[in-house]
């Protein structure tokens, strides 16, 4: 691992760095109708921006997904965001070719299906409301009110430090108090790129991905992500591989998070590289 193969600018498929990745890609090409392609949203399909409300899918992402989706078993977007927000910011609704797209939002706790336009969701965890009530006071006491920003996710809360005077220092200073707050309310803290998310335990991208692959009876899987929240999905692909389901792990090349690049079979150049890879895959399956 570690030698980074960057996708080229044409439609040729890049070669994964690892044997497991090469086997995964071979299985995808051999059995597309039994393949699940799963992708994170922020940083993978959409460039990271200071204000997550302004995040939009890469301009060519929807076209690339629509070209690929009819040729495989399923495309799933797995995100910490509410599914409706990902659908809106991604522009995924009503797109020819994406009739079977599934968005697993809130790390898989909620699901949107393009086929029906419905969101399937269990009731929210009561600890989220209690943490929400305490959070402003906590940020105030921590002296972190300036430049930090609370993102309301319904089933979760996220504190962003990207706009603070010293984003990394604010992130480190808030880690412990937010972990205490989460623990008191039966929640966990999920750290990301200058963001700390408080959410219910028991659901992560790995659980969501594994359940979806099993539900479809998929025989090959590709997962692309860029952040620490994607590590459980990476672990899930490793586990699926050990169970005989080949997989390909793609890192949407972030300099901010090296853990993923080190574990990926293939590192591409951010959302631009992800789009190129999806397009090359669709062309190969034509």
Image (cartoon, grey):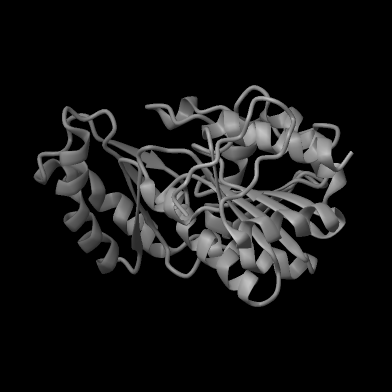
Q: Quadrant of residue 127?
A: bottom left
Q: Give how far across and how far down residue 155 sits, in percent.
A: 47, 54
Q: Give how far across and how far down residue 215 sits, in percent.
A: 75, 68
Is residue 271 shown above or below 200?
above
Q: Is residue 253 left or right of residue 197?
A: right
19, 209: nearer the viewer: 19
Q: How many marks?
A: 0
Q: Is residue 127 left or right of residue 111?
A: left
207, 44: nearer the viewer: 44
Q: Give how far across and how far down residue 92 sits, in percent.
A: 71, 34
Q: Give how far across and how far down residue 161 sits, in percent.
A: 26, 36
Residue drawn at x 86%, y 45% is 71
Is residue 144 shown above or below 58?
below
The residue positioned farthest toward the bottom in the image shown:
243
Residue drawn at x 77%, y 59% is 27
Q: Is residue 253 left or right of residue 136?
A: right
């Amino acid at each position: 691992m570690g030698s980074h193969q960057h996708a080229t600018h044409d439609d040729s498929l890049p070669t994964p760095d690892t044997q497991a990745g090469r086997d995964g890609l071979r299985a995808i090409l051999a059995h597309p109708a039994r393949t699940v392609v799963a992708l994170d949203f922020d940083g993978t399909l959409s460039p990271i921006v200071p204000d997550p409300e302004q995040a939009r899918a890469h301009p060519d992402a929807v076209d690339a997904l629509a070209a690929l989706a009819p040729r495989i078993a399923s495309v799933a977007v797995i995100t910490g965001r509410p599914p409706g927000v990902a659908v809106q910011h991604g522009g995924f609704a009503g797109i020819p070719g994406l009739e079977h797209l599934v968005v697993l939002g809130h790390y898989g706790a909620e699901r949107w299906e393009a086929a029906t336009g419905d969101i399937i969701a269990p009731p929210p965890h009561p600890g989220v409301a209690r943490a929400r009530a305490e959070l402003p006071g906590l940020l105030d006491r921590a002296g972190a009110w300036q430049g930090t920003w609370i993102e309301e996710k319904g089933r979760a809360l996220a504190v962003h430090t990207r706009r603070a005077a010293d984003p990394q220092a604010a992130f480190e200073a808030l880690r412990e108090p937010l972990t205490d707050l989460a623990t008191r309310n039966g929640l966990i803290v999920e750290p990301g790129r200058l963001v700390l998310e408080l959410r219910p335990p028991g659901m992560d991208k790995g659980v969501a991905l594994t359940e979806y692959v099993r539900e479809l009876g998929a025989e090959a899987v590709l997962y692309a992500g860029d952040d620490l929240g994607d590590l459980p999905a990476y672990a899930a692909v490793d586990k699926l591989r050990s169970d005989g389901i080949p997989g390909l792990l793609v890192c949407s090349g972030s300099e901010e998070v090296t853990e993923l690049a080190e574990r990926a079979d293939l590192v591409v150049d951010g959302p631009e590289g992800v789009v190129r890879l999806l397009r090359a895959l669709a062309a190969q399956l034509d």
